[in-house]
Image: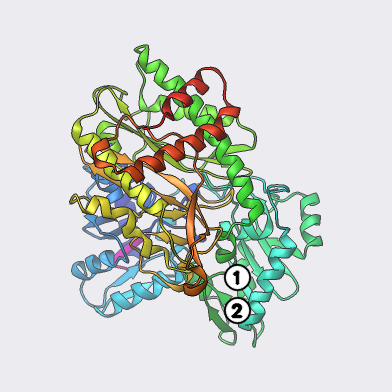
């Protein structure tokens, strides 16, 4: 047996034994936890433990004699490498709502078979769709069992990091005001109670932060808001007495983390509970008594936190300058080392860039694992170099660097591509088309409340015209010293709903790309802020919005094929670089400032 895949095969055998004992024919293991988080505490990284696939998204399906991992195009190359020899087949899925795992189970199982999935980590909306798809084929769904527990004796415990306050001036709105606004929304819907499980919503509402989830400054908790008191269900000892007293003064009581489901079960008959079906798990819904009326709608906090206040936007602008200065210092050092002939690798990029950010005031940590992909590795959108597998920075190719930081005054996420050696004409063409897509969306004007997915095609159009496309979304929402991926705003191929309307104050990424498997990848990413657009016809046709580019870092002009750019595109880039130079120059000196001057010269 392959020693690399032997642990995976043994784990699959142990889970299959548990599956047989349960009387079930198949198991689904989602990439999820009781809070439906994207980045998971180790305790709920069951899909990675069982499959060996380290990507952040994916669904594992397992029967007694077959196994499949369902992943989208961001992970295909990575998944093929990590699953090799494990006995798990990669199932490639496209964008949009997915039923591929249900279809696979229907093809594998006879009518009457039972499929297990842990309801504690299965979203309520996802459970409805899964039960419907399986039920149509005569399959039953069992959600009251966690089969991983029996097969995973070394399963990690819950994280114990302390919770702390996000304070003024960075926390510009008091938590009492946020709770008052939430209760007003509850009153308008006739809700007496509201249950929140998503960690960024809870952190935002309470002005608290933590370190229970890698890269996201959040903590494990559930929040049950009543008309007078909000109960924060959080681990014992995570909140010190002084902070507990300040929370109590704002009407927030503390209760054990594990008691949240019992609190729902104890709701009085006649109560009206507000749940967000996309942001709460099936297990919590099933604990709600029959005599409690339900309101199913998006969390009010999800909408409110996506719309940054003017004070928050100012903090983000300051944070972008700090982050941009750190990147300039990194790139100046990095390019000088390459020019001297230093032998650098992708690991050096992560180490050096993180060190420069760590020097900045208010820096807390990375906002996601740094992606530094040279050559073919850049063609994997979610690639991550490791000590066991990384590449040198060498050859005539492109280096893609996607990184970000968590600061007290905001969250950053930026991608730049730099030439290594002499890039080919084909590389420059791809780079220029991606830049044209970035610019096309960055200058867009659009009606207020337009669903974000309606904007996705603007960034793709220059690529589509050349017969090129990319498999990920064009833009994701970004939190305020919170999750780097935030909803409900999304510029993607997602099926839009009413909550996805673009509103002033929303921050999103703009990040089109081109990926040539085995050769190179290009992605250029800025963060943008939705702001009112000053248009002459606005009064007659309603409010329009545009984007303010927040990210401050040069876009490398050496990779541009200028014959593909028109005068307007060149003028936009020159204006952008003038702004970058003006904002960052006072923060830099010496080699870093000279590098900035060189990289922001007019095209």
Res 17 visible:
no
Task: Point out which mark residue 411 bears.
Answer: none
The residue indicated by pointer 1 is: 195
Quadrant for residue 369, please give it. Answer: top left
Residue range highlighted in magenta: 24-29
Residue 139, given in percent of the width and then of the height, sits at 28, 76
Residue 501, given in percent of the width and then of the height, sits at 47, 68
Name the residue at 70% across, 53% down. 172
The crowd level at tag 2 (other Cα within 10 Å; few <14, some 14-19, many 20+) is many
| Image: 85 above or below 24 | above
Q: Which of marks 1 and 2 is nearer the N terminus?
A: 1
Residue 407, given in percent of the width and then of the height, sits at 60, 41
- What secondary structure predominates along the stretch shown in magenta? strand
CA distance for labels 1 and 2: 7 Å
Q: How many labels does the image show?
A: 2
Helix, strand or loop status at disc 1: strand
Name the residue at 69% across, 51% down. 171
The residue indicated by pointer 2 is: 273
497 and 321: which one is in front? 321
Res 181 visible:
yes
Q: Residue most toward the front? A: 536
Quadrant housing the C terminus: top left
Q: Residue most toward the top? A: 340
Say if mark 1 contacts mark 2, CB within 8 Å. yes
């Amino acid at each position: 047996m392959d020693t690399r895949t032997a642990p995976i095969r043994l784990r699959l055998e142990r889970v299959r034994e548990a599956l047989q004992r349960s009387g079930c024919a198949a198991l689904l293991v989602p990439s999820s936890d009781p809070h439906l988080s994207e980045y998971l505490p180790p305790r709920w990284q069951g899909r990675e433990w069982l499959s060996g696939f380290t990507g952040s998204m994916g669904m594992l399906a397992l029967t007694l004699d077959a196994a499949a991992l369902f992943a989208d195009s961001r992970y295909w190359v990575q998944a093929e490498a990590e699953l090799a020899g494990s006995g798990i087949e990669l199932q490639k899925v496209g964008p949009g709502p997915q039923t591929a795992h249900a279809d696979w189970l229907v093809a594998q199982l006879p009518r009457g078979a039972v499929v297990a999935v842990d309801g504690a980590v299965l979203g309520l909306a996802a459970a409805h769709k899964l039960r419907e798809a399986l039920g149509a084929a005569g399959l039953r769904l069992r959600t009251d069992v966690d089969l991983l527990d029996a097969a995973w004796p070394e399963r990690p415990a819950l994280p114990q990091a302390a919770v702390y306050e996000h304070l003024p001036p960075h926390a510009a709105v008091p938590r009492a005001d946020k709770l008052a606004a939430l209760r007003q929304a509850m009153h308008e819907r006739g809700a007496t109670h509201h249950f929140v499980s998503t960690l960024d919503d809870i952190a935002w509402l309470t002005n608290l932060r933590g370190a229970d989830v890698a890269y996201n400054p959040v903590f494990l908790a559930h929040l049950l808001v009543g008309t007078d008191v909000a109960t924060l269900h959080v681990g014992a000892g995570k909140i010190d007495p002084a902070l507990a007293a300040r929370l109590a003064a704002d009407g927030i009581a503390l209760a054990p983390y594990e008691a949240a489901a019992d609190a729902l079960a104890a709701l009085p008959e006649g109560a009206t509970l507000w749940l967000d079906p996309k942001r709460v798990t099936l297990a919590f819904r099933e604990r709600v008594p029959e005599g409690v009326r339900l309101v199913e709608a998006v969390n009010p906090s999800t909408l409110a936190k996506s719309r940054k206040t003017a004070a928050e936007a100012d903090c983000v602008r300051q944070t972008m300058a700090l982050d941009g200065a750190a990147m300039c210092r990194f790139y100046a050092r990095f390019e000088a080392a390459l020019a001297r002939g230093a032998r650098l690798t992708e690991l050096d990029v992560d180490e050096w860039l993180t060190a420069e950010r760590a020097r900045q005031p208010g820096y807390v940590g990375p906002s996601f694992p740094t992606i530094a992909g040279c050559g073919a590795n850049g063609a994997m959108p979610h690639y991550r170099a490791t000590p066991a597998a990384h590449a040198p920075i060498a050859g005539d190719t492109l280096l893609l660097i996607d990184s970000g930081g968590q600061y007290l005054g905001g969250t950053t996420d930026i991608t730049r591509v730099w030439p290594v050696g002499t890039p080919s004409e084909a590389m420059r063409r791809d780079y220029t088309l991606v830049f044209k897509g970035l610019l096309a969306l960055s200058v867009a004007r659009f009606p207020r409340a337009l669903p974000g997915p309606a904007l996705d095609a603007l960034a793709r159009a220059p690529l589509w015209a050349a017969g090129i496309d990319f498999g990920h979304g064009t833009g994701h929402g970004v939190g305020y010293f919170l999750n780097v991926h935030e909803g409900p705003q999304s510029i993607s191929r997602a099926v839009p709903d009413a909550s996805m309307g673009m509103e002033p104050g929303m921050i999103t990424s703009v990040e089109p790309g081109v990926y040539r498997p085995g050769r190179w990848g290009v992605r250029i990413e800025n963060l943008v802020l939705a702001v009112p657009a000053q248009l002459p016809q606005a009064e007659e046709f309603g409010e329009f919005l545009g984007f303010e580019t927040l990210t401050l870092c040069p876009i490398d002009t050496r990779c541009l094929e200028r014959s593909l750019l028109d005068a307007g595109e060149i003028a936009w880039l020159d204006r952008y670089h003038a702004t970058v130079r003006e904002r960052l120059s006072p923060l830099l000196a010496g080699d870093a400032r000279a590098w900035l001057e060189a990289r922001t010269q007019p095209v």
